[in-house]
Image (tube, rainbow, N blue to C red):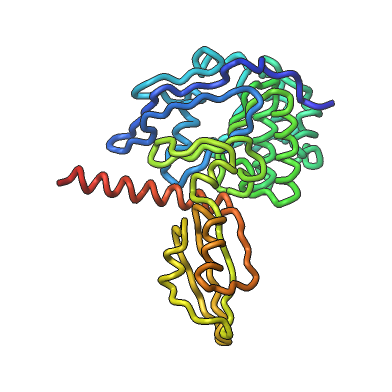
Amino acid sequence: MSTVTAGPRADEEVAAFRNVSKSYGPVRAVNGLDLVLRPGETVALLGPNGAGKSSSLDLLLGLRDPDQGSVSLFGGTPRAAVETGRVGAMLQSGGLMGDVKVRELVKFACDVHPRGHRPAAVMADAGITEFADRRVDRLSGGQEQRVRFALAIAGANDLIVLDEPTTGMDVSVRRQFWATMRAQADAGRTVLFATHYLEEADSIADRVLVLHRGRLIADGTSAEIKAKAGARRITFELHPADPYVEETALRTLPGTVSLDVTGRSDGVRTVRIRSTDADAGVAALYRAGFHPHGLEVTSLGLEQAFLTITGEQDAADDFADQEGAR
């Protein structure tokens, strides 16, 4: 029997941050965050270390209070949502009781949850049945993560919050994990996960949020985030027999954002161009007298887009800091 049951109404507001800020001493961890989550979304929360991901999750779960603004869950306080069993969480912080068996720990979580599931179903969904009779302190790191996941889905939650959930899991277990998460979202639940595995965000998330220095700097589908980064890469080779063209001509192609040219011992040059207008750039290649071999035009990966967006934001923030210091 699956632990998936009907979730909240499609028009219900699951979570809302409204002008939320949180500081720890001189460090502004969350800075004017505005964000709304809806039922059935699978949302990836991305950002470099120190971007405010874990602090935002703590505020969402009511573990900390904002210095400014408000955080609500299902129209009420985070604490009320947690106490009524509408939220399940799998966090990096906090340990597991080590001197009990996995089965006992999961049963306890199901028993105390206001809308608890059957322990056997929870263990099956989490993929931990095979080591259910093992003591928790005898588990590997990946197995511990799967137990934490089981505790997060011990009841009929409407929101599931996951902080770096697949750390330590091997590829096959990660695949099973995300299949279970997709089933939860398909039932109308909202899944919010913070991750450093950008390929997971790219393949799993309906929506991607990028935090940087406590601010939300990008919000959209994976494709929209890639487009925001300036989007496509043109790659080709120039052979020694081709007429030589100066690299300055490549830099003036329409839409060129960056250019990388590397040479091999046989004289072949590999050209990589990041372009905001790949169609115009390719057409201009031929008009300029280039003879590209093995021409490819591809979208930037989410990781490349992430690095571009955060790098540009770093540059903008540094410039603003310099201007403010004058």
Which residue is at 44% across, 35% downward? 216
Quarter occupied by the N terminus: top right
Is residue 119 visible in this depiction of the protein? yes
Which residue is at 20% across, 43% downward? 324
Is residue 162 visible in this depiction of the protein? no
Which residue is at 48% across, 27% downward? 35
- Nearer to us in this view, 195 or 244: 244
Which residue appears farthest toward the left when viewing the image?
326
- Nearer to us in this view, 268 or 106: 268
Horizontal side of 11 relative to 310 (left or right) equals right
Q: In the figure, residue 176 lies in which quadrant?
A: top right
Vertical side of 265 occupied by 127: above or below: above
Horizontal side of 63 relative to 326 (left or right) equals right
Spot occupied by residue 245 in the image (x, y as percentages of width and height): 47, 77
Horizontal side of 114 relative to 240 (left or right) equals right
**How many labels, in total?**
0
Which residue is at 61% across, 36% downward? 96
Spot occupied by residue 2 in the image (x, y as percentages of width and height): 81, 27
